[in-house]
Amino acid sequence: MSARPHKGRGAVSRRNGRFATRPVEFEDEEAARRDAVAPETVLKAMQVRSIISHNRSPDVPFDRSINPYQGCEHGCIYCYARPSHSYLDLSPGLDFETRIFYKPNAASRLLEAWEKPGYECKPITIGANTDPYQPAEKSTQVTRQLLELFVKYSHPVNLITKGSLIARDIDLLADLAQRGLCSVAISLPTMNDKLKRVMEPRVPSAEARLKVIRQLTTNGIPTSVLLAPLIPAINDAEIESVLKAVAEAGASHAHYIFLRLPHEVSALFTEWLEAHFPDRAAHVMSLVQQASGGRDYDNRFGVRQTGRGAYADMLGKRFRAACRRNGLVLDRYQHSLDCRQFIKPGQRQLGLDL
């Protein structure tokens, strides 16, 4: 018996993570009954020892990032961060979008990092994995607390989000942008509300995100758009319409990322396809594999974000042509920011004392 979708949730099951210490295998009927219970969101505090993550990925335009949350209630089925819940012995499926961990000491840990003698100022990206403006941010305000520090100490920051809640922080972002210290990337993979409701169920509508782009750009905040991910036979027909809409809303740059299916995401995505698009599930995965060397996912740098082969090349050509027609700067979703203004914590007070 196949698992059934839940309204407002992306994954259709609590599939075990690859590090499950006590994996439990249910019979089909038992598993279906278990997954039939509508999952509620549980928000928990997670105290962290450090807050800045580092990476050396050559195909990512930043080498340090902050994620105020682990797990994301937006529920995007394609999210490549889902496997991170496996490290908590939780399911990358429904648990990832219902067991949300927020980091209440994120701001204090950021200050500690900046105070270290060897700290070198480079732009930090907020939201590289999970969305910093998911629903929990409305009450916890972890992201806003971090931004207040970026403003106070003139540290450059880039943000990536699908959440319209970012409009709440335009006062801080405009302050940073006026000094060349911030840019924002808004992810918008579809204009189709029906598709959005099943693909990224708790994300604001396309119209809400276009409104945010207008608000950001009106306030002088450099804004890019990520058409991510491009999914064969699901949203690939929307390349031209999405880019036209975001350009009219004021976005200046655009970038796309081909569907990525690392680790458990592959099985979760296939399960989702069979539940929502049974008529084309096999065709979708056939095109994904054509662009991934016969596999569900090719994780090599230089390939994992764009795919390869004739189909992937065709998507790239269409995207580039649509960018040119709409006056969008191609393949950049983060702007150059000024690192010279950073005031190391303690220096400001020392200057006043003198």
Image (spheres, grey):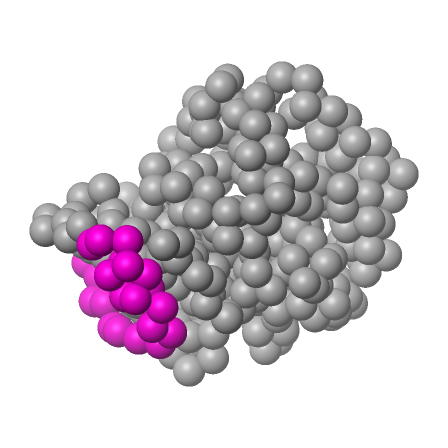
Q: In this view, does 204 lie above or below 161?
A: below
- Asked whether, in this view, residue 299 is left or right of residue 177, the answer is left
Which residue shows up at 66% across the image and 50% down it?
189
- The residue closer to the viewer here, 14 or 218, is 14
Which residue shows up at 63% across the image and 60% down it?
196
Which residue shows up at 60% across the image and 64% down it?
197
- Asked whether, in this view, residue 102 is left or right of residue 161, the answer is left
Q: Position of residue 249 (x, y in %)?
A: 81, 60
Q: In this view, does 177 lie above or below 65?
A: below
- Asked whether, in this view, residue 166 is left or right of residue 272, the answer is right
Q: Is residue 165 magenta?
A: no
Q: Position of residue 246 (x, y in %)?
A: 78, 54
The quadrant holding residue 108 is bottom left
Which residue shows up at 39% across the image and 57% down it?
3
Q: Where is residue 351 in the image (x, y as percent from the top left)?
A: 39, 67
Of the 4 image quadrants, the one containing the C terminus is: bottom left
In this view, the residue farthest toward the bottom is: 139
- The residue closer to the viewer here, 298 or 48, is 298
In this view, the residue farthest toward the right is: 325
Decide if residue 200 is in sight here.
Answer: yes
Q: What stretch is highlighted in magenta?
A: 26-49
The quadrant holding residue 315 is top right
